[in-house]
Amino acid sequence: MLQDAGVDLSRPEVDTEDGEGRTALTVALAFGQEAAARALLEAGAGVNAGTGQRPLHGAAEGGMVEMLRELVDKGADVDAEDGEGHTALTVALAGGQEAAARALLEAGAGVNAGTGRRPLHAAAERGTVELVRELLEKSAEVDAEDREGRTALTVALAFGQEAAARALLEAGAGVNAGTGRRPLHAAAERGTVELVRELLEKSAEVDAEDREGRTALTVALAFGQEAAARALLEAGAGVNAGTGRRPLHAAAERGTVEMVRELAGKGAEVDAEDGEGRTALTVALAFGQEAAAWALLEVGAGVNAGTGRRPVHAAAEKGMEEMNGVRQARQRAGDEVFGMRRTEICGLFRSEVQIVPVRNEEGWAE
């Protein structure tokens, strides 16, 4: 025991905190050390002590139901927050400790408490459908946002918890709710095509943007979810929508050549720039997507387009990585850049620009 190790539990240091703001009581509870926790309580350890995770959070994380009840009986603040704005109820739900969560609910834990992630978000992420329903029955705010601007529906979809997502939709969760990533973005990222269609049928805004200025179509393409991307295109998703990265950039980075051609065929602006001033051709070259780069050149991508890094810079940069220096790359014109013959690339550029001097942000030219 602690006394045997020479620890004087009668001293005020019983509530001293570690680097994470936890007391010894919190640590003992988090690791399921009930005997040590009781020794600390007998010595006067504070049930609300700690500037980080509180003892109640530790017991919730460890699933120690009897200790939870004992702490509450001793005056533990049932809705106290840890350093991330989570209550003990949220911690229990996030850890899949259903019995602990129900004990906290019986003790009056607030279903909407917490300035960080709410209990409903935690249950949605975990996919504990019965607790999702129970929280909703207890008046949990179905469209409350976490610190990233996501609702519980978005979280459920992001973690592939389809049953939880449907329970939230049945309870009236907004398909356009959230100031961060929307539910449609999350479904697109996971590639859950049926839920993408279901959200669209419920009037989800097909071209809504997330905080990075991306539409759900861009997100689907960025994660290689072609079926979800096509479902969005069938629903009228804009091929030029988004104030951040455009769909064509995402398809170019991923190297999905058929999608590159399909987007171009639907009127995607082939030389549109992303937030860094790069065209899709530059992106394709930067990520080594040879076939996508050729497809973009075939549909008229400009070899001098872009106010940021130009296509020739992306090709030269890859050459620098593979051939130990841009100067060496220039001297060895027959070496490969991104799997394309450098002479072939330069031939394409030379036909229009004769490899004109173009400076990038570091001042070197190609």
Image (cartoon, grey):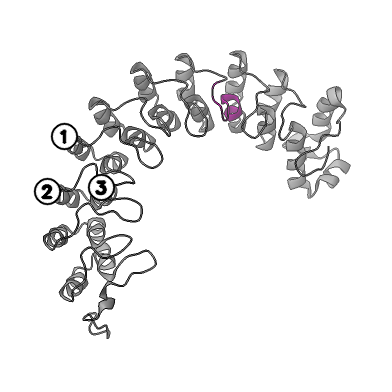
In which quadrant is the C terminus drawn?
A: top right
Q: Circle 3 — which element?
A: helix
Q: Residues within 10 Å of mark 1 (few under 14, many from 20)?
A: few
Report the amino acid beneath label 1.
Glu
CA–CA distance in space, label 1 to label 3: 16 Å
Q: Residue at x 58, y 18 (%)?
A: 263
Q: Earlier in the sequence, mark 1 or mark 3?
A: 3
Q: Is residue 335 above or below residue 91?
A: above
Disc nearer the start of the sequence (3/2): 3
User: Which residue is under mark 2?
Assistant: 106
213 on left or right of 335: left
Above or below residue 266? Residue 275 is below
Which element type, helix, strand or loop, lies under badge 1? helix
Mark 2 vs mark 1, CA separation in Å: 14 Å
The image position of residue 58, as x and y in percent, is 26, 60
Q: Secondary structure at mark 2?
A: helix
Confirm whether the magenta stretch covers residue 287.
Answer: no
Residue 242 within the magenta-colored segment of the rendering = yes
Mark pair 3, 2: CA separation: 14 Å
Mark 3 Cα-neighbour bin, 10 Å: few <14, some 14–19, many ≥20: many
- Within the image, what quadrant is residue 313 found in? top right
Tell me the magenta residue range.
Answer: 241-251
Residue 294's x, y, as percent? 71, 25
Residue 244, horizontal then vertical, whole percent: 56, 30
